[in-house]
Amino acid sequence: MIFPERDAAVATGGDRMRALVCERYGSPDVLTFAKRPRPSPRKDEILIRVLASTITSGDRRVRSMDMPTGFQTLGRLALGWHGPRKAVLGAEFAGVVQAVGSRAKGFTPGDAVFGISGFGMGAHAEYLCMRAKGALAHKPAQMSFEGAAALSFGGGTALSFLNRAGLCAGEKILVNGASGNVGTAAVQLARVMGAEVTGVCSAAHLEQVRSLGAARVMNYSQEDFTQLHQQFDVVFDVACNHGVERCLNVLKPGGRLIRLQAGLPEMCRALLQPRRAGRHIIVGTAEERADHLDYLAELVRQGSYCPVIALVFPFDEAIEAHRYADRPGHGGSVVIRMRGSEKKEVPASA
Ligand SMILES: NC(=O)c1ccc[n+]([C@@H]2O[C@H](COP(=O)([O-])OP(=O)(O)OC[C@H]3O[C@@H](n4cnc5c(N)ncnc54)[C@H](OP(=O)(O)O)[C@@H]3O)[C@@H](O)[C@H]2O)c1
């Protein structure tokens, strides 16, 4: 069905949809289920029936207003002072195109898609509108909707920062926080790029990180990577549990340090002093790009990339899913499935 303009979309029979709503900041207890108006696509948008979504570290940060140092006030100004202005959270999703705006190109009703709405959020609901030119791609046919929902956030973040670091074949990279959403993606993508990977994580996830392609794994409760004698071309610091100076100890001259959780003071220092002792510090936010998602989908088709899923919850248990995602050490993506009522573990090949 193609809608000439926004108002006509109301004629989809669209009225109300079920959504998980967050109207004030706090623990998962602030979340409630509510009926919300079903969105209708503008001319350049498509309407997607969401079949699966995830609870990312981004959703958890917005829900709890837990921002890196120096971003508390900016975060509230940008997202809402007492609670999120966009009360329906959910940044990544997979689903089926339901309707297409008159100027939206590249998608037709019935297409299976996945993508990331970023701070636009809205994926913890039965329907979502996205710009057709946004971070959206066709779902790889062999992948479930649960698997595809977990493709964009970790994979897109890792790809965006690895590209900025210019990781090359034959280089050595250390990923600190290798077992989480971004880390498991970084390990796999660095391998695809031909790098040799060292992964740092808890004892519980050592084998998993090794199976994703890390040549060496380190248990952070037994070894401190900043004390290694070895040096790396790239350190991808997801966990950011050590200071910058200590991380620079294990970086070769000309090496690149990616700091995913840099606070405002650290960001300012990195931007004003982009190189320290010949080493480049990379901070900021990940780009959300359709071509990155196409690339990840192609890797899935080739069998060289697969997001790691911790657990799939039915939508009815989405509040419980937030509690689960808040637990340290859950590993991989926490997925919510819009239909069905059973909770299940999904192997990495899903
Ligand atoms: N700048 C950006 O654009 C951007 C984008 C995405 C995410 N982020 C940020 O990056 C962070 C991680 O995101 P995520 O989604 O990957 O989170 P996640 O799935 O919760 O993963 C957290 C990772 O940190 C590891 N970890 C915990 N304590 C550690 C320690 N002491 N030493 C080493 N590793 C440790 C965990 O290992 P175990 O589970 O094995 O304990 C896990 O691998 C979040 O703070 C998020 O806000 C930033």
Image (cartoon, helix red, strand yellow):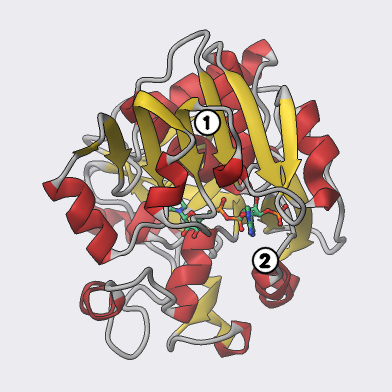
What's the residue at 27%, 87% (across, down)? Answer: 81
Reply above or below: 149 against 327. above
Rendered location of residue 284, percent (x, y)? 29, 49
**Cβ of mark 2 under 8 A from ligand 1:** yes
What's the residue at 76%, 63% (across, down)? Answer: 314
Q: Is residue 330 left or right of residue 98?
A: right
Q: Quadrant of residue 221?
A: bottom right
Q: Name the residue under label 2.
A: 325
Q: Give the residue type at disc 1.
A: Asp
Q: Mark 1 points at which residue?
A: 111
Q: Residues within 10 Å of mark 2 (few under 14, many from 20)?
A: many
Q: Give the residue type at disc 2.
A: Ala
- Front residue of 271 and 221: 221
| Residue 150 appears in the picture as rendered | no
Q: Ligand 1 appears in which quadrant?
A: bottom right
Reply above or below: 329 against 160. below
